[in-house]
Image (spheres, rainbow, N blue to C red):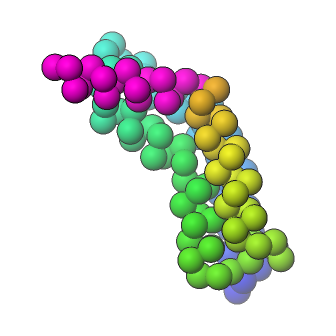
């Protein structure tokens, strides 16, 4: 059973780059880059590998023999780096500042 869960997790992780690259399509509508709820939704969806390994760590499980904490650290760095390269944190900052000023 553990191997099936690990294989399922691996498929979800292999699907993540496609989710990341298509996440910019959420900002297709005019004004969506200023919409705070859209930006937060995109960030939460793109960060799903962090949730997966947080659950692994909470359950004290291993991912193909690797420590869940090690996998969580690696995935967190990769996800945060990818989101910063795509500029999501800048969009979030601008949307929060605009929301607070209005």
Q: Which residue is pictured at 42% across the width and 19% down the height?
A: 28
Give percent across and percent down for residue 86: 59, 26
Closest to the observer: 76 or 1? 76
Residue at the limit of the structure toward the top, as seen here: 30
What span is colored magenta in the figure? Answer: 86-102
Residue 60 lies, with reference to residue 83, above or below; the image says: below
Give percent across and percent down for residue 84: 60, 30
Q: Which residue is pictured at 69% across the width and 53% down the height?
A: 75
Q: Is residue 21 left or right of residue 10?
A: left
Q: Is residue 92 magenta?
A: yes
Q: Is residue 93 left or right of residue 25?
A: left
Image quarter of residue 40 = top left
Does residue 18 appear in the picture of this structure? no
Residue at the limit of the structure toward the right, as seen here: 65
Q: Which residue is pictured at 61% across the width and 41% down the height?
A: 80
Closest to the observer: 65 or 76? 76
Residue at the limit of the structure toward the bottom, as seen here: 1
Q: Is residue 21 magenta?
A: no
């Amino acid at each position: 059973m553990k191997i099936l869960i690990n294989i399922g997790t691996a498929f979800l992780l292999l699907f993540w780059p496609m989710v990341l690259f298509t996440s910019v399509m959420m900002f297709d509508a005019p004004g969506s880059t200023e919409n705070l709820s859209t930006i937060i939704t995109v960030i939460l969806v793109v960060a799903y590998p962090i949730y997966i390994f947080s659950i692994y760590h909470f359950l004290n499980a291993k991912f193909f023999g690797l420590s869940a904490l090690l996998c969580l650290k690696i995935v967190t760095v990769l996800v945060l780096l990818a989101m910063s390269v795509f500029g999501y944190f800048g969009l979030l900052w601008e949307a929060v500042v605009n929301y607070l000023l209005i």
